[in-house]
Image (cartoon, rainbow, N blue to C red):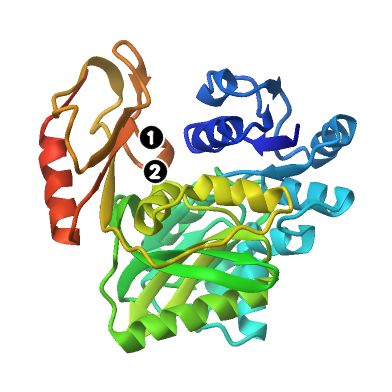
Amino acid sequence: MKKLMVMGAGIYQVPLIKAAREMGIYTIAVSIPGNYPGFGYADEVLHINTVDSEAVLKAAQERQIDGICTAGTDVAVMTIGRVNDALGLSGISYEAAKIACDKVLMKQAYEANGVRTAKYRKVYFNEDVNEKIKGLEYPLIVKIVDSSGSRGITRVDSPDRLQAAILNAQSFTRKDYYIVEEFIIGREFGAQAFVMDGKVQFVLPHGDYIFLGSTGVPAGHFAPYALSEEGERDCIETTEKAIRAMKLDNCAVNCDFIMRDGRTYVLEIGGRSGATCLAELVSIYYGYDYYRKIIQVALGQKPDFPTDKAVPNASKLLMSDRDGTIFSLANRNPKDSEHIVEVKFDYTVGDTVKKFHVGPNRIGHVITKGGTLAEATATLDKALEHIEIGVS
C-alpha cells in the first residue's frame, strides 16, 4: 500500500485525505495538536509542526513514504520541498518552494525573467521606511513575505497610515523584513494551474468575490472568468512565464493577478492548490477529482489533465459579522437540488467564531454549478438566502 503524507489536517486538507483513503492509500496527517477535522479521516496522525522540516523528514524516512503534499496553504510548502529533495519524491523542489514562500525571492525571480509585476521594495523593520520607498507612488500595499490567507497585508492610501500597516505586518511574520509595493489599479482575478514534467497542463482563470477589509480578501470564486481572446492569451503566457521563473514543477499552482489595460500583472503565485473552494472549482469545471490528480503526481504518477469540459460554477464562504457564539445554524435548501453542489458548515451550535477578516475566519461554504455562469451564480445567491447563521 502506498503511503502519503498530507501536511495539515484543517478544512482544506480534509478532501485531500479523504480522496487518498478512497484511492486505497495509507494516509498520514501531519499537524500540530488541535481540533482539526482531518485527524478523524487519516490512518495515522503525527503531531509535528509542518514548518519543522527536519522532524517531518525524519518521520517520512522512518515510514518510507511514497509522496507528500498539501492543499490550500503555503505554510508547509517549504517542508514538502525539503522532503521531496531528500527522498527523491515527485513534487515541488526545495529551491522552488523557497521562492514560492518568500515574496522577495518571488519578486526577484519575476524581475530577472521579465514577468510583469508591481514595483516594490524590500524593507527591514529597523530601517527608515520612508527613505527606502522613495520612488514608489501611493496607494501602496504593505505585506509580509512568508504567509498566505491575506494575513499581514494592508493597503495604505497615505503616509500617515504607513506605520500602522507595518506594525500589523510585524505581528504576523517570522521574518525581520517585509515588502512595500505599489497598488496596481485594475481588475483582480486569479487562476489555477498545474505543471508536470516542466509542462503546464492547464491554466484556468477564475473570478474572485472579494471581501473588503484592510485589504481585499477572497471570499469566493467563480468560473469561467470573462476575458477577451487577447487577455486570456496574455494571462496564460504570463502564468507560464512566472511558473518557469519560479522553477515550479510537478505541483498545483495558485495565482493571484491584476488585469490592467488588457495585460496580466502577477501579484503572487503559490506552489499548491488554492483555498476557498478553488480545488473544487477545478474539479467541477473540468469534470474530474482534482485532489486525486494532486495525489497521483505526488506519488510519481503521470495522470492526464483533460480540459474538454467546462462546467460553470461558483462558491462563497459563510461568515459572521461579529465575534461570538453560534446559537443557530441551519441549511434550509432542498436536499435534491441539481445545481447545489455542497453546503458545508465548519462549526456547530455552541462553537465560538470570529468576525470575518481573513479566509480562516470562515464558518463554511456553499458551492453551486449551472449550465451557464449566470445560472450558477443565481443558484448561489438563492442558496445563501436559505442558510441561517445566528451569532451572539
Dot 2 lies on which element? loop
* Crowdedness near tag 2: few (<14), some (14–19) or many (≥20) residues, C-alpha within 10 Å: many
Question: Disc 2 designates what residue?
Answer: 358
Q: Position of residue 345 (x, y in %)?
A: 32, 26
Quadrant where the N terminus sits is: top right
Q: Position of residue 104 (x, y in %)?
A: 64, 67
Q: Position of residue 256 (x, y in %)?
A: 44, 65
Q: Amino acid at mark 2?
A: Val
Circles 1, 2 touching at the beta carbon (< 8 Å): yes
Q: Position of residue 221 (x, y in %)?
A: 31, 54
**Rendered residue at 62%/83% (across/down):** 111
Q: Amino acid at mark 1?
A: Asn
Say the numbered circle drawn on residue 37: none
Q: Residue 115's quadrant in the figure?
A: bottom right
Q: Residue 271's quadrant in the figure?
A: bottom right
**Rendered residue at 72%/55% (across/down):** 91
Say the numbered circle drawn on residue 361: 1
- 382 with respect to 241 (left or right): left
- 271 with respect to 327 (left or right): right
Q: Residue 46's quadrant in the figure?
A: top right
**Rendered residue at 74%/53% (across/down):** 300
Dot 1 lies on which element? helix
Whole-Å distance between the Cαs marked 1 and 2?
Answer: 6 Å
Residue 248 in sight from this viewpoint:
yes
* Crowdedness near tag 1: few (<14), some (14–19) or many (≥20) residues, C-alpha within 10 Å: some
Depth check, front residue: 365 or 212? 365
Q: Is residue 147 above or below residue 345?
A: below
Depth check, front residue: 44 or 54? 44
